[in-house]
């Protein structure tokens, strides 16, 4: 039987073979609180981050996922472990180092003020080319997209027709959105604000993708903090 096309002529991924990803940013970290860039530095959740993860766990209680993956950094793994305790079947968390945040290199541990003082040329370059500019000694968004794109498709190939929960970082959530949309215009990355413990849902097949939901943080309505700052844009920690 011929597959039905969407009104604009796009053939949506076949749910029988595509993978539905629920991509979650970790809870607030202690360096988020301090306003420090962290990248791949291993930093734990803050007190608020633990509360955010608990709120997400309550929201997802009893839901079924065929697999759970997490960046191996502590802030993601802590969030994942708190949530999976409440899921149907208590699935194990599978560490995925290739889903780590962007490598910020020499910027790790610095504040925005530090970066403006010590790396003014980097900020100029980033303003001109937010996609291709590498963090000093680290990665660019292009590098991150390439690395994490491979990771998402590796997981997709392992779980055709399944629903998978992924715990990761703000930059990697943007990658998932880009994969679903077939790319994101370079200057739109800055507008993809990703709050801590928000849920972004994408459906990915080998050839196409669909964005099902973005930055859903309804579970945080009763919390005072829902940090959006991350290490991707060079504008905020």
Image: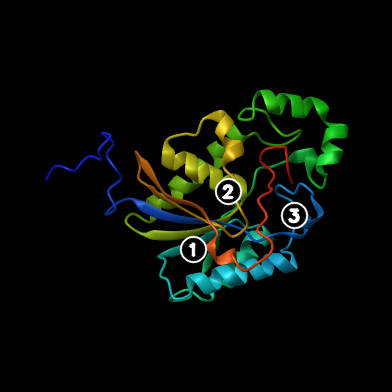
Q: Disc 2 to disc 3, how far (Cα)?
A: 22 Å
- Residue 106 disc label: none
Which residue is at a point 57% across and 46% down the rendered structure image?
172
Q: Is 197 on the left-hand or right-hand side of 233?
A: left
Local SS, label 1: strand
Picture layout, residue 14 above or below residue 142: below
Which residue bears the numbered disc 3? 32
Q: Disc 1 to disc 2, how far (Cα)?
A: 14 Å
Answer few, some or many: residues within 10 Å of disc 3's Cα (few below 14, many 20 plus, some between 14 and 19).
Answer: many
- Residue 68 disc label: 1
Residue 145 percent location from the top left of the image: 55, 38
Answer few, some or many: residues within 10 Å of disc 2's Cα (few below 14, many 20 plus, some between 14 and 19).
Answer: some
- Are the two marked residues, 3 and 1, in contact with CB atoms closer than 8 angstroms? no
- Are the two marked residues, 2 and 3, in contact with CB atoms closer than 8 angstroms? no
Camera-nearest label, 2 or 3: 3
Camera-nearest label, 1 or 2: 1
Which residue is at a point 69% across and 64% down the rendered structure image?
224
Local SS, label 3: helix
């Amino acid at each position: 039987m011929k597959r039905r096309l969407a009104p604009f002529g796009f053939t949506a991924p076949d749910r029988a073979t595509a993978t539905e990803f629920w991509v979650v940013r970790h809870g607030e970290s202690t360096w988020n609180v301090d306003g420090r860039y962290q990248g791949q530095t291993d930093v734990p959740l803050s007190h608020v981050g633990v509360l955010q993860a608990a709120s997400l766990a309550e929201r997802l209680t009893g839901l079924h996922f065929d697999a759970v993956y997490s960046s191996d950094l502590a802030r993601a793994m802590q969030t994942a472990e708190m949530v999976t305790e409440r899921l149907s079947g208590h699935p194990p968390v599978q560490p995925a180092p290739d889903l780590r945040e962007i490598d910020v290199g020499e910027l790790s541990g610095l504040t925005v003020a530090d970066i403006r003082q010590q790396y003014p040329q980097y900020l100029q370059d980033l303003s001109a080319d937010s996609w291709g500019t590498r963090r000093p000694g680290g990665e660019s968004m292009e590098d991150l997209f390439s690395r994490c794109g491979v990771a998402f498709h590796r997981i997709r190939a392992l779980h055709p027709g399944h629903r998978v929960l992924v715990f990761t970082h703000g930059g990697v959530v943007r990658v998932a959105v880009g994969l679903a949309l077939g790319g994101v215009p370079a200057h739109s990355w800055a507008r993809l604000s990703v709050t801590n413990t928000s849920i972004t849902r994408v459906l990915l097949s080998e050839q196409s993708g669909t964005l099902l939901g973005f930055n859903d943080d309804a579970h945080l309505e009763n919390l005072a903090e829902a940090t959006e700052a991350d290490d991707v844009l060079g504008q905020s920690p």
